[in-house]
Structures are given as structure tokens and as C-alpha cells.
Image (spheres, rainbow, N blue to C red):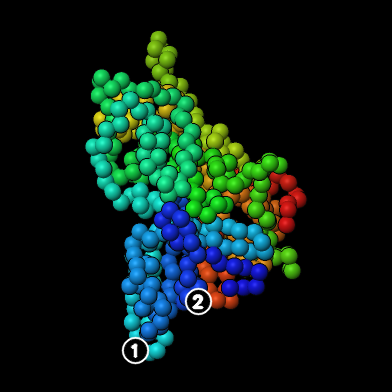
Amino acid sequence: MLRGAQLSIRTGFITHDPVPQALIDAITELQITRQSPRGGFQMKLRLAKGGPVETEMLPGGMFTPGKRFIFSLMIDGVRTVLLDGFVARYDVAQANDAGKATLSVTGGDVTQLMDQYDITGLPMPGMPPMGQVAFILARWTPLGVIPAILPPPSWTIPNPVNGWHIQQGTDYGHVNRLARACGYVFLVEPTEQEGVTTAYWGPDLGGLTPGGNFNSQGLSMLPALTVNMDQASNVETLSFSFDGTQKLLPYLLSQEIRATGLTIPIPIPGEILSPPMGPGWIPYARFSKLADLGRNSDRETQARLDIPELVMRGLGEAAQASRVIGASGTLDLARYGRALVPGRLVPVRGAGPHHDGVYLVKSVTTSIKRGSLKQNFQLSKNAHGSYTQEVAA
């Protein structure tokens, strides 16, 4: 690791203890990817003949599928939990040359476990969508999963006498299906406390969803990504893209004027959930009628959605399709001094007035090797330019 940076790996299903130092010493490369809606990791280790990894850890079940590893990184006294992961598989590559054998351990976040067991048919009587989500996520609280559930604008409690909902598929699949039906998103993110994860089920609010963008002083952002500013630059590469054909405006057709037979289109702009992140508003390029969203995907009821539910679906689609400006690059964490985290807001400066401004961190891949600590990142925003000329460095 670099000076001023410290990698911490803890293991344990319920309690979390530091891994043996021999495991840390054997790591040749660690890659952690976090992107919506899921994250994962790959850890490569030297498999020295007769060494502790081969003779103790591997036979002792250290890398058994389902084993929990919590990766955190401390840079200049600031700790960031990179991933709370669970092993999915491992691969051993032997070699004739001494010291060339490797062990690759691959895994994902807690959604990997949520998506393993199909318990279709589990009854959930008298539960609206948010009740079903709370019922399912409660099963994962022993692993530190804390639900953050926002109720839909319109919901009813079904009468159990008339039948009840049943779970369809895995926990992750069922919760995700309910989120799509309501125009919501389901995101699982580690918190600042190791072993505690937030499971957010609610509207796509971009950087306003639970993820650390607020503190006691109000809105909080990551330090600015700086390019083309000599010694102040802290990114290695930074490029931008703009797809002006993807911004979507869903609409409903109102047929209230029955005397004339006229229909009135009612637009559902994404700016309601995703306010412009700059002064340069981007016009809509696609228009879509919400005809296909007129029925709930729940096969048990096939009941028509009411207007509030339709509007939430349209808002969710429009908000996600509004972020048509993208940025990608490579960051040296030793110069930046922090770790980028998906879902956080970060300013960009030095890229020119058209591309400067606040962006949403979309995905991050952290690559850790001896003497190297870098992140590949993707950002997005929904408007050109910046509202302010000054940002925190």
C-alpha cells in the first residue's frame, strides 16, 4: 500500500475479525467494483507452495463460498468501506515456475445471497408492496442490513379474505420487481460502519438517496475532481460524452373531455425527481406513452394501476433517462486523498465551463496493488454547466 493509505479486510458472518496478516501479504491485486444496483470483488493471491494460504487458509475454509469479507480503505485518516462482500467462487492456477501459482477469489455484495434461494409461494397476507419489502428485508437484519423504505404515493392493504400475495422468486428478485412496479429503485450500499448495510427501496432521487450526501451542516460533497490545472490536478484521465437522443419524456393521455372525444397529453418530466444539476437544460428527444404501464406486473392480481402509481413509474423512468451527460476517468487516490463512492455527489473543475459542475458518481472500480491505488470511475449528470464558480478543492 501507499504511504498514508491502509487496507483493512475483516471476515466473519456475524462478528467481524481482521484476516490473518499472511492473507494481506499474499494479495497481489484486489479489484472492487460498485455500480447500481450490485457490487462485487476479485482478490488475487500468491499461492506459495507450502505457504499459509495453501496449507492453512484454503483447507480451513477461508475462501468457502458464502464466506464474508468486508473491505475498507483508510486514506489520511478517512475510512471508506469499499464493499461488504461474500465469496461466490475461487479459482486456482498452478504453474511450473516458482511463485507463479495464484488463487483468485470472486464474490459479490449481500444481493448475491438474496438472489440465491427461490422461495416462490411464501404467503404474505394483508401486505401492500412496502410491507412485503419490509417482511423480506427483515430476514437479512442479522447480517447488518438496515431497510430504508419509502412508501409509494398510493397503496392499499389487501383483504386476506379475498386472497393474498405470495413471493415470486428470490428475495432480491421479488423486491426488485416490486420496485420496478412502483417506479422505484432498490439499492444496497455499505455504510461508514463496517458490517452495516443500507437497503434503500424508494424513488430514484440520484444523489439525494441515502448515501452520505448529507450531514449536520446540510448537503455534503466529495472533494472536487480537478483536471488541466497543473499541480492542482488530481485525476489522470477524464473524458466526457453526451447522448442527446436518450432524454425521455413519458406522458399520460387524459380522456376526460368526453363530449368532444379529445385527449389531452399530460407530461411527466424527470426534473421532479432529478432536478437539473446545471443551468444548461437539455431538451427532450424521446416521447413515450405510458400505455404498457397500465397494468401491474403482479400476476396474482393483474389489477390496473391508479394514476399516482402510473405517475411514479413515469417519474422513475424519466429521472433515470435524464442523465445523458457522462464522464469517465482514472483517479490516483494518493493525490485525491479520498475514495470515490457511488451515489455521492462530486464537483468537477478545470474541464471548461460546459463540463464543469456537480456530477453523480455512477460506478467505481477500485484497483489495489503494491505501490498503486487507483479508481476507474463513471459520472453522470442531467444538465450542462455549473451553478457556481467556486467548489471545495
Query: Which residue type does callout 1 highlight?
Result: Asn
Q: Nearer the viewer, residue 321 or 142?
A: 142
Q: Quadrant of residue 48?
A: bottom left
For the residue labelled by badge 2, is the local secondary structure a helix, a strand or a loop? helix
Q: Is residue 21 left or right of residue 278?
A: left
Q: Which mark is residue 222?
A: none
| Residue ID for mark 2 | 25
At 55% from the left edge and 76% from the top edge, which residue is drawn? 370
Q: Nearer the viewer, residue 147 or 182?
A: 147
Q: Is residue 226 left or right of residue 181?
A: right
Crowd rating for badge 1 (residues with CA inside 10 Å; few <14, some 14–19, many 20+): few
Q: Quadrant of residue 76?
A: bottom right
In the rendering, at what x and y percent does residue 366 appear?
Answer: 52, 64
Crowd rating for badge 2 (residues with CA inside 10 Å; few <14, some 14–19, many 20+): few
In the rendering, at what x and y percent does residue 320 appear?
Answer: 49, 43
At 37% from the left edge and 42% from the top edge, which residue is drawn? 139
In the rendering, at what x and y percent does residue 36 appear?
Answer: 46, 50
Asked whether disc 1 touches disc 2, contact meaning CB atoms under 8 Å apart, the reply is: no
CA gap, disc 1 and disc 2: 22 Å
Q: Nearer the viewer, residue 252 or 210?
A: 210
Query: Which residue type does callout 2 highlight?
Result: Asp
Q: Is residue 187 visible?
A: no
Q: Nearer the viewer, residue 365 or 211?
A: 211
At 49% from the left edge and 48% from the top edge, which residue is drawn? 197
For the residue labelled by badge 1, is the local secondary structure a helix, a strand or a loop? loop
In the rendering, at what x and y percent does residue 386 appear?
Answer: 69, 47
Q: Is residue 297 visible?
A: yes
At 30% from the left edge and 25% from the top edge, which residue is drawn? 303
Quarter holding the C terminus is: bottom right
Task: Work out whether mark 1 precedes mark 2 in sequence or the reverse, and give the earlier one.
Answer: 2
| Residue ID for mark 1 | 96
